[in-house]
Image (cartoon, grey):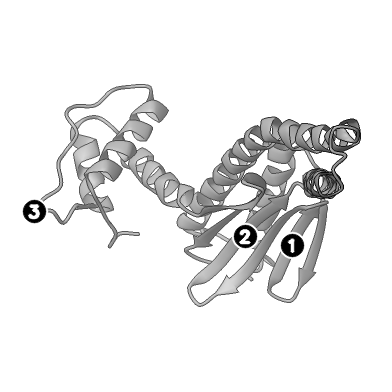
Amino acid sequence: MRERRYNDDEIAAIFERASETQSAGGGALPASRGGDGLTLAELEDIGREVGIPAPLIERAARSLDVADRTRGRWMLGLPIGVSHTVDLDRSLTDEEWHRVVLDLRETFDARGRLREDGPFKQWTNGNLEALLEPTPTGQRLRLRTVKGNAIRLMSVGGVLVALSGFLTIDAAVHGDLLSKLAGVAFPLLMGLGIVGANAIRLPEWARLRRKQMQEVAERAALTAASDVADEPAGASGS
C-alpha cells in the first residue's frame, strides 16, 4: 500500500472522501509531482497540513482501491450477478473473521451459514457467498451473488421472444400472417414484458449489492491493516 502512487484524479477522490468523512473541507488539492503521483505517506503528510487526520486519508485511499475490484455478470445486457474481491494484508484471526460475518449478516440482513475446510472459510446465504482463502501474503475475501430468479425469468422471456419470431416466420412462409397475428403477438408481448420488468429492477439491485460488497470489503481491509495486539489465547491467524 505504501509503495502505490496515486494520480491527480485519485488524489482528488481521496481528499474528497476523507473530507466527507470528517465533515470538514480542506485546502487546495495537491497536484502530482513530476507525473509520478503521490504515495500514501505523502498524502497523509499533506492531510495533516490541511487538518485531515492520517487514518481518514488511509481509509479513503483503501476505499478507492477496494472499489476497483467489483465485477458483474450479465445476461441480455442486464446485470444478474455481482462479485467483489479484496486482498487482505494479513490473515484474520478467528475473532476478526467472526466480526466480518456479523458485518455480512447486518449489511445483507441475512443469517447465513458458516463452514470451514482447513484454511478456507465460507459464509453463505442462498446465492450470496463470502469466501475467505489464503494467499502468500495474507488472505483474499471473495464476495459474490447471483439473482437466481432473474436468470430463470430472463431465460423464459428470451424463449418467448424467440418463439414469437419463429411463429412469425412460419406464418409468413404460409401466407397467413394476418390471421395468426394474435398468436404471434402474445408470446412477443409476454417475453418483452418479462425482460422489461427485469430491466427496471436489476440495475438498482446490482447497484445496491455492489455498494454493500464494497463497504464490507473496505471494513475487512481496514481490519487487516490494523496490527494484532494482545491476540487472545486460542485465536488463530488462519
Identify which residue is drawn at 23% across, 49% down. 7
Q: Is residue 38 left or right of residue 182?
A: left
The quadrant of the picture occupied by the N terminus is: bottom left
Q: Residues under labels 1 and 3: Cα distance? A: 45 Å
The quadrant of the picture occupied by the C terminus is: bottom right
Q: Nearer the viewer, residue 234 or 144?
A: 144
Q: Is residue 95 left or right of residue 9?
A: right
What type is the residue that disc 3 sits on? Gly
- Image quadrant in which you'd find residue 178: top right
Identify which residue is drawn at 87% across, 48% down. 174
Q: Residue at the far top: name it.
A: 24
What type is the residue that disc 2 sits on? Arg
**Neighbours of disc 3 within 10 Å: few (<14), some (14-19), many (20+):** few
Q: On the image, numbered disc 2 is attached to which residue?
A: 142
Placement of 90 over or under 206, stated as above or below: below
Q: Is residue 57 visible?
A: yes
Which disc number belongs to residue 34? 3
What type is the residue that disc 1 sits on? Gln
**Neighbours of disc 2 within 10 Å: few (<14), some (14-19), many (20+):** some
Q: Is residue 92 visible?
A: no
**Mark toward the viewer: 1 or 3:** 3
Q: Residue at the far left: name it.
A: 34
Q: Is residue 111 left or right of residue 48?
A: right
**Mark toward the viewer: 1 or 2:** 2
**Which is more N-terminal, label 2 or label 1?**
1
**Neighbours of disc 1 within 10 Å: few (<14), some (14-19), many (20+):** some
Q: Residue at the far front: name it.
A: 175
Q: On the image, numbered disc 1 is attached to which residue?
A: 122
- Image quadrant in which you'd find residue 115: bottom right
From the top left corner, tell me how far across and down residue 147 is, in percent: 75, 46
Q: Secondary structure at mark 1?
A: strand
